């Protein structure tokens, strides 16, 4: 029985390592400026913890095999451990994991703690059960005033846009996130009801949207296409349906789209959806 368990542990270890090496269930290709830095950091972490995991499991299998009950009646030996060994492996583990943590902070800092680059497009994002609303300032570059008391799903005013504010006249509230390739985007994430989480796997980017908070985030998409925006926070019964799409458009298509009226806009977005199928992964 001891041998069978040891072999089982080793086989499971090999399968687990193979799942990562095979790459079949890996991330979709990244489409943002900071994506490669994130991926590099992730690979480094995976290698470090992968080596530790494999070594620990092989050693566990060995111990199970070596010290199995052989039926000859010998009694087990109890050990009080070895303080020097304890200190060594605790210090080594601490050094490795703190170093990996600090390296990770660098990537995180550049994305989350630095101000957005000049010339960025700003979109205010209001999450609600169970949809994403993207608020664009329009030609005047000014967002119309919003008021939670004006929110009405029946009147198709999902974000409570104040129609009496002149700045709101040219605003658009849509369910598609439209961005321009290689232009930084700043999102102001908000939530109407419960906590949601903005996630585009290809951006390597995930951030909660929390009621009562305005959370600014920014990134620069660098690959034209259409990508799924998922809600990554279990936010209610239809959480699984809470998704929308992010279009990353070349400059000419973006400008042409921006010039359209709201009705033409919807039709054009539908065309662009056909033109840019969602990547399969
Ligand atoms: Cu949600």
Image (cartoon, rainbow, N blue to C red):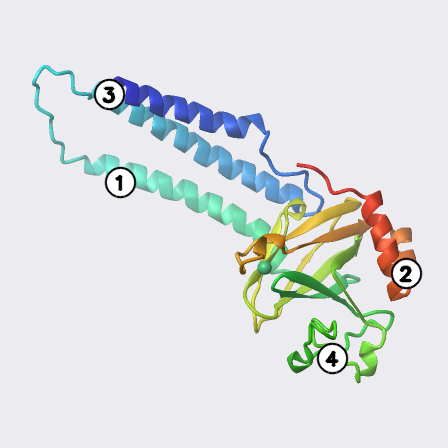
Picture disc at residue 87? 1
Classed neighbour count for the residue bearing mark 2: other residues with Cα under 10 Å, few (<14), some (14–19), many (≥20): few
Instruction: Say which residue appears at 29% left-offset and 37% top-offset.
Output: 88
For label 4, the crowd category at 10 Å Cα-Cα, with few meaning under 14, some 14 to 19 and many 20 or more, is some
Which quadrant holds residue 78?
Answer: top left
Residue 215 located left or right of residue 62:
right
Q: Mark 4 vs mark 3: which is more N-terminal?
A: 3
- Which label sits in the foreground, 4 or 2? 2
Earlier residue among tags 4 and 2: 4
- Disc 4 secondary structure class: loop
**Residue 264 has which mark?**
2
User: Horizontal placement of 28 versus 78: left or right?
Assistant: right
Image quarter in which the N terminus is found:
top left
Give the number of callouts.
4
Quarter of the displayed picture in which ligand 1 can be seen? bottom right
Tell me the quarter of the picture where residue 27 sits. top right
Name the front one of labels 3 and 1: 3
Q: Position of residue 233 (x, y in %)?
A: 54, 56
What is the C-alpha distance between the residues marked 4 and 1? 60 Å
Residue to which mark 4 is pinned: 145
Q: CA distance from mark 4 to mark 2?
A: 25 Å
């Amino acid at each position: 029985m001891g041998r069978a368990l040891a072999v089982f542990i080793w086989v499971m270890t090999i399968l687990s390592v193979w799942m990562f090496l095979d790459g079949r269930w890996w991330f979709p290709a990244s489409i943002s400026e900071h994506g490669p830095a994130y991926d590099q950091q992730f690979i480094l972490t995976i290698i470090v913890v992968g080596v530790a995991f494999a070594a620990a499991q092989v050693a566990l299998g060995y111990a199970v095999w070596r010290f199995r009950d052989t039926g000859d009646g010998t009694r087990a030996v109890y050990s009080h451990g070895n303080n020097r060994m304890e200190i060594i492996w605790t210090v080594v583990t601490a050094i490795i994991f703190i170093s990996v943590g600090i390296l990770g902070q660098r990537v995180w800092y550049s994305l989350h703690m630095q101000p957005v680059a000049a010339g960025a497009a700003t979109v205010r994002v209001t999450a609600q059960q169970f949809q994403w609303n993207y608020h664009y300032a329009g030609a005047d570059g000014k967002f119309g005033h919003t008021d939670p008391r004006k929110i009405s799903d029946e009147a198709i005013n999902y974000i409570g846009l104040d129609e009496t504010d002149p700045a709101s006249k040219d605003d658009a509230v849509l369910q598609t996130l439209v961005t321009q390739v290689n232009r930084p985007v700043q999102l102001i994430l908000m939530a109407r009801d419960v906590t949601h989480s903005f996630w585009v796997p290809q951006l390597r980017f995930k951030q909660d949207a929390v009621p009562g908070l305005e959370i600014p985030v920014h990134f620069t998409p660098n690959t034209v296409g259409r990508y799924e925006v998922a809600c990554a926070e279990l936010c209610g019964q239809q959480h699984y349906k809470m998704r929308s799409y992010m279009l990353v458009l070349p400059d000419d298509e973006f400008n042409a789209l921006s010039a359209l009226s709201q009705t033409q806009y919807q039709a054009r977005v539908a065309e662009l959806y056909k033109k840019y199928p969602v990547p399969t992964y």
